[in-house]
Image: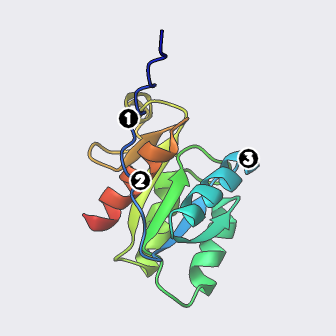
């Protein structure tokens, strides 16, 4: 009896970038490095910061455009929403994606994020991450 060929995995294309610049802010080093590697492999230019203070400094010092801020919601010093508000005062055209291990509903209940803000729950797949980033940048 012949063996059956295995069905092809259901692979959707990844949302690839066009060298847009993304600032990623995450206080957990492993997640920060993982996000950086994923975004680099998807054709984005990536700036990384391990704290809100470092992100504010990077945002002020970076001479080019920053197209997207991806930030953890819960961090020491200030939360992701406060960080995004401060960065966006100097970069009003920048878009933002919030990520957290907490659900969007749990975060909304504590008043950290408003309804309709771009949110991605951790852990996430490269597929989900790439498609969410691409949708925000194109929107």
Label 2 sits on a secondary structure element that is loop
Residue extending farthest bottom: 63
The quarter holding residue 111 reads top left
Of labels 3 and 1, earlier in sequence is 1
- Evaluate whether residue 32 shows in this view: yes
Of labels 2 and 3, earlier in sequence is 2
Q: Residue at x 39, y 72 (%)?
A: 94
Camera-side residue of 7 and 33: 7
Q: State the mark number for residue 51.
A: none
Where is mark 3, residue-wise? 30
Q: Distance between the residues labelled 3 and 1?
A: 28 Å
88 with respect to 55 (left or right):
left
In the rendered image, residue 67, in percent from the top left (x then y), is placed at 42, 74
Question: How packed is label 2: few (under 14 Cα within 10 Å), some, or many (20 or more)?
Answer: some
Q: Residue at x 44, y 64 (%)?
A: 85
Where is mark 2, residue-wise? 14
The quarter holding residue 138 reads bottom left
Q: Which residue is drawn at 51% across and 88% down?
A: 64
Label 1 sits on a secondary structure element that is loop
**Which quarter of the figure is the C terminus placed in?**
bottom left
Where is mark 1, residue-wise? 10
Q: Select label 3 or label 1 by which is in front.
A: 1
Camera-side residue of 35 and 99: 35
In the rendered image, residue 17, in percent from the top left (x then y), is placed at 43, 68
Camera-side residue of 33 and 105: 33
């Amino acid at each position: 009896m012949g063996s059956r060929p295995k069905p092809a995995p259901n692979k959707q294309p990844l949302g690839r970038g066009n060298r847009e610049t993304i600032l990623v802010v995450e206080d957990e080093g492993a997640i920060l490095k993982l996000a950086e590697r994923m975004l680099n492999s998807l054709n984005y230019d990536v700036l990384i910061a391990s704290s809100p203070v470092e992100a504010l400094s990077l945002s002020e010092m970076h001479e080019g455009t920053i197209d997207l801020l991806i930030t953890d919601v819960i961090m020491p010093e200030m939360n992701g929403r406060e960080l995004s508000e401060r960065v966006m005062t100097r970069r009003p055209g920048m878009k933002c994606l919030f990520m957290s291990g907490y659900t969007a509903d749990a975060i909304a209940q504590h008043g950290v994020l408003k309804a309709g803000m771009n949110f991605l729950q951790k852990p996430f797949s490269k597929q989900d991450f790439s498609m969410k980033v691409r949708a925000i940048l194109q929107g």
